[in-house]
Image (cartoon, grey):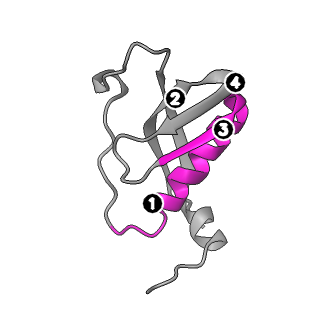
Amino acid sequence: MNHKVVTYPAIFKPLENDIYVISFPDVKGGITEGQGLREAMKMAADTLASRLYNKAVLPKASKASDIKLPDDGSFVAPVSADLTEASRDRINYEI
C-alpha cells in the first residue's frame, strides 16, 4: 500500500517551562502545543494529520522562507504526517 505523506511548514513559538505553541499557516485550525521539542513535533504531526486526512484537496504548502516570524524566538520547521495511517486511526463523523 502506498502511503500519502505530506509536509508543511510549522511555526514553533517557545513559551515558559519548555512549552511550544505550534501553528500551521497553511492549515485552517492547525494549532497545538507540546512540552519540549520532541513532544511538540509529535503533537504537530498529529495535528497536521487530523486536520488533513479526510480532505479531497490539500492546501498548498508555503515555502518556509516566505513565512514572516515575530521577533519572539519563534522558528519555522517542516512537519510531516502520514495521512494514510491517520485515516485508518480515525473515524470520520458526519453531522
| Three-letter code for the amino acid on which mark 3 is drawn | Gly
Give the amino acid at mark 1.
Leu
Q: Who's the residue at 54% across and 56% down the image?
A: 49
Tell me whether circle 3 and circle 4 mark residues in contact (CB < 8 Å): no
Q: Position of residue 66 (x, y in %)?
A: 28, 25
Give the position of the N terminus as an image quadrant: bottom right
Disc marking residue 34: 3
Which image quadrant is residue 37 in?
top right
User: Is tag 2's residue or tag 4's residue first in the polypeptide sequence?
Assistant: 2
Left/right placement of residue 30 relative to residue 37 reads left
Q: Indicate the quadrant containing the C terminus: top left, top right, bottom left or bottom right.
A: bottom left
Q: Secondary structure at mark 2?
A: strand
Q: Residues within 10 Å of mark 2 (few under 14, many from 20)?
A: many
Measuring 56% from the left and 50% from the top, which residue is drawn there? Answer: 81
Q: Which is more foreground, mark 1 or mark 3?
A: 3
Task: Tell me which segment is drawn in magenta.
Answer: 31-56
Rounded to the nearest angstrom, the CA distance separating label 1 from label 3 is 20 Å
What residue is disc 4 on?
18
Q: Which mark is residue 94?
A: none
Identify which amino acid the numbered label 4 is placed on. Answer: Asp
Amino acid carrying label 2: it is Phe
The answer to which of 77 and 19 lies nearer the viewer is 19
| Residue 16 x/y as whole percent | 65, 22
- Which comes sooner in the sequence, label 4 or label 1? 4
Given this view, does label 4 or label 1 mark the residue nearer the observer? Answer: 4
Q: Is residue 27 above or below residue 16?
A: below
Q: Is residue 12 left or right of residue 41?
A: left
Per the model, the C-alpha gap separating discs 4 and 1 is 27 Å
Q: CA distance from mark 2 to mark 3?
A: 10 Å
Label 2 sits on residue: 12
Q: Secondary structure at mark 3?
A: strand
